[in-house]
Image (spheres, grey):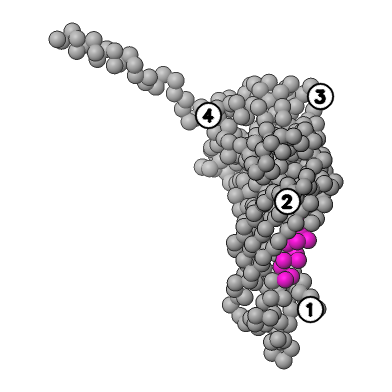
Amino acid sequence: MKKRLALVLWLCCACLGGCWDRVEINDVALVTAVAMDFVSDRAVELSVQVFVPRSLSGGDGGANEAMTLIRSAEGVNIADAMSKVQLKIPRKVFWGHCKVYIYGQELARHGLEEYIDYYARHPEPRNRAFMYVSKGKASELLKIMPPLERYSAEVVRKLSELEVGLAVTLLDLQKMFANPTNAAALPMIDMMKPPKKERPQATNPYLFGTAVFKNGKMIGALSDRTTQGVLWLRDEVSSTTVTIKIKDERGFVSLNPIREKTKLTPLIENGKWKMLVDIETEGDIVQNGTKLTLNTPEQIARAEEGMREDIQTRIRLALSQVQKEFKADIVNFGREFHRKYPKEFAAVRENWDQVFSELEVETKIKAFIRRPGLISVPGGLPEAEVQTN
């Protein structure tokens, strides 16, 4: 009996993994951001931003010590370049904390499909990490020392989490490249002009538009205003301000949409392809630069009409570029047709760019103003000049 018990205990001990393959935190280099730049048709430059733990406690350099360090290397692909970067870092590189991946614009124009596989295949990179295209060289954005956040990756990540523009994760980008429409979009970032010439790196990165891709290659860019139209069509408007002009009135009125819903309804009638776009939004007035009180049904109706016209203008601007100029379906029309008309879509799949550029888009916008704010008359305006009707 004792021998059997000893045998069972031995077998149990043999099955325990223990800590033989442990990696101490002091032996790990935490990557906070990654930048990739084009070198040649056979080489890419990989730059990693690594967090410096001792900077939190002052280190040897005190309060002025950098929070991160940058290491770069060239290779025929990301895996090759990464193996060379590891030679320059005395700790094991760990990708699990990296939430920011930046592609240089030149690399984006040559194509990104080849550079997605490494992050999708490797077990450490996060699928929820945010992806960007930089206006210039991507590695330069890693060197920024922002005055508000600890390092540049924090600034970029928080901008995406605020949803003030297009936000695309690694998982989103994989789905876009696998989409039969062969179109994708990534937010673009650039550096603000530094306030002091002697400190060129003491500045902030910022979002300034959208990079449009077809077949994995960047073919153009959209402005901030056009991007807002794309967000309305994609049902991704979260944090924005709509500034409108009320007909026959001087000044502007600004509103914050608090709820928004976009519904896409594809139709094929008599061989004609058509997309119905129904948008319903509710907003609050945050600034009134007119002489109207905006607290009567008539005045509210005029403001709601201005809001509808502004959204319509943004959508038309977006469709003019993505549908007519780029012929790139980044507004997910193809996905909706594929769901409702799978056989018909399969028949035009190879020619979807042309079908997308020619299909009719009909928009119906319902805009409602729910709250005019804490005051009933324009602030700072003499009562005699206020229009109550």
Q: Earlier in the sequence, mark 1 or mark 4?
A: 4
Going by the numbered disc 3, the residue's amino acid type is Asp
Q: Secondary structure at mark 4?
A: strand
Q: From which residue to which does the magenta span run?
A: 305-315
Disc 1 versus disc 3: distance between alpha carbons?
Answer: 57 Å
Q: Provide the residue designation for mark 3.
A: 41
Number of residues whose C-alpha sits closer than 10 Å to that of mark 2, classed few (under 14), some (14–19) or many (20 or more): some
Quickly name the residue at label 1.
249
188 and 261: which is toward the camera: 261
Q: Are marks 1 and 4 in contact (CB under 8 Å)?
A: no
C-alpha distance separating marks 4 and 2: 51 Å
Q: Nearer the viewer, residue 307 or 151?
A: 307
Q: Residue at x 71, y 49 (%)?
A: 267
**Which residue position holds label 2?**
275
**Residues at marks 3 and 4, CA–CA distance in whole angstroms:** 33 Å
The numbered mark, 1 or 3, whose residue comes first in the sequence reads: 3
Of callouts 1 and 2, the N-terminal one: 1
Instruction: State if disc 3 and disc 1 touch (CB < 8 Å).
Output: no
Disc on res. 294: none
Instruction: Report which quarter residue 254 is drawn in.
Output: bottom right
Residue 40 image point, x, y percent: 81, 25
Q: Amino acid at mark 1?
A: Glu
